[in-house]
Amino acid sequence: MFDEPAETLNLRQLRVARGGDTDVVPVPKARVVQNRTANLVQIGPPGPGLGRRFSFGLNTITLGRDSHCSLPIPDGSVSRMHTVIEPRSDGTYHLSDLNSRNGTYVNGKKVSESFLNDGDYVQLGQCVFRFLAGGNVEAGYHEEIHRLTLLDPLTGAHNRRSLAEYLDREIERAGRHSRPIAVLMIDVDHFRQVNDRHGHPGGDLVLRELAARLRNLARLEDLVCRYGGEEFAVALPETDLPGAIVAGERYRRAVAGNFFIVDDESFAVTVSVGAAAIHPGEARSASELLKSADTQMYDAKRAGRNRVCPILPGGLNHIPEIEDTPTMGGQTREIQL
């Protein structure tokens, strides 16, 4: 982990990208508040950089792929000179994008410049950082590292480790009390086309919004997990297979029933859902339950996508009171996925 700023050519110069090149424009030295510090903690993507910390206080810092940046980020989705963060004399920190290829996002919103607040999320290409400043930066850092062990940094949903621990505990409890437990596997249909059209930052926005919709529908006792890539899992205690299928249909329609918006363009996204359950008297492990739900999800893909499997006799999957047409909002154009 990096606790001290890396050496640069000149930390008191603001680099402004122009036409793919970088000019160096001198900036007058600002009077800044003494004895303050801030941190950027890398929280995504998974890899060797996860959890590293870069501390800075009185110096203007540059972020980018170039080795001379204050914070070099060796990732192909990051521009050579991507972003600059400048401390101001009033104690604030100001971020400016340097005409980067994939843009700079603060809390999921694309910005050309923005003031940073404690706890803000900063995304450069596929790399996500948490900005920490204020009274107790050290405590904030350790709290963020703890969050990384439980939550997916992109979507805020639980990660696979959380899901595994939760299922082991809940399956044992369900067996002890002769209660059912179910799992849904939810996969975005044709997600590659979203990335191809809107780039990875656009795809990330879709995943964040999708996770938010899943969490909004989940009960307090349910656990929503980003299982990997564009695949999510939902653990449903006290739920049998018919109940899981009905829940899966509600999740499917929550995704398909409202357009997603990226860069002012609205488009529909659908998901395929697989359901599986352990009923009283059955002896199945968490991995077997997940594998069964995953198999059903691929059956939904093969059956035409945008559906829940298995389909039970009598059409229990159908929930007539929920509309399945995306809600229109302003100027929209649907992308055929």
Image (tube, rainbow, N blue to C red):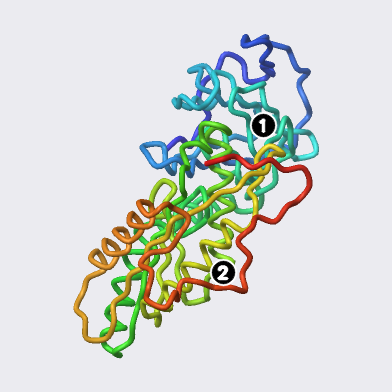
| Residue 297 shows up from this direction | yes
Tell me the quarter of the image containing the N terminus. Answer: top left
* Residue beneath the point at 22% across and 70% down: 285
Q: Secondary structure at mark 2?
A: helix
Vertical relation: 145 (above or below) 70: below
User: What is the x, y in percent for residue 253?
Assistant: 56, 62
Q: Secondary structure at mark 1?
A: loop
User: Of the residues shown, which amino acid type is indicated by label 2?
Assistant: Leu
Horizontal side, residue 181 vs residue 155: left or right: left
Labelled pair 2, 1 in contact (Cβ < 8 Å) = no
Horizontal side, residue 330 vs residue 8: left or right: right
User: What is the x, y in percent for residue 71?
Assistant: 53, 27
Q: Which residue is mark 1?
A: 58
Q: In this rendering, which labeled residue sits more in front, label 2 or label 1? A: 2
* Residue beneath the point at 29% across and 72% down: 168
Q: Residues within 10 Å of mark 2 (few under 14, many from 20)?
A: some
Farthest residue to the front: give it. 314
* Residue beneath the point at 72% across and 30% down: 112
Vertical relation: 90 (above or below) 326: above
User: Of the residues shown, which amino acid type is indicated by label 1?
Assistant: Leu
Label placed on residue 80? none
Horizontal side, residue 179 vs residue 57: left or right: left
Disc nearer the start of the sequence (2/1): 1
User: What is the x, y in percent for residue 334?
Assistant: 64, 42
Q: Nearer the viewer, residue 54 or 157?
A: 157
* Residue beneath the point at 67% across and 9% down: 23
User: What is the x, y in percent for residue 226?
Assistant: 43, 55
| Residue 40 shows up from this direction | no
Q: Which residue is mark 2?
A: 217
Give the quadrant of residue 241: bottom left
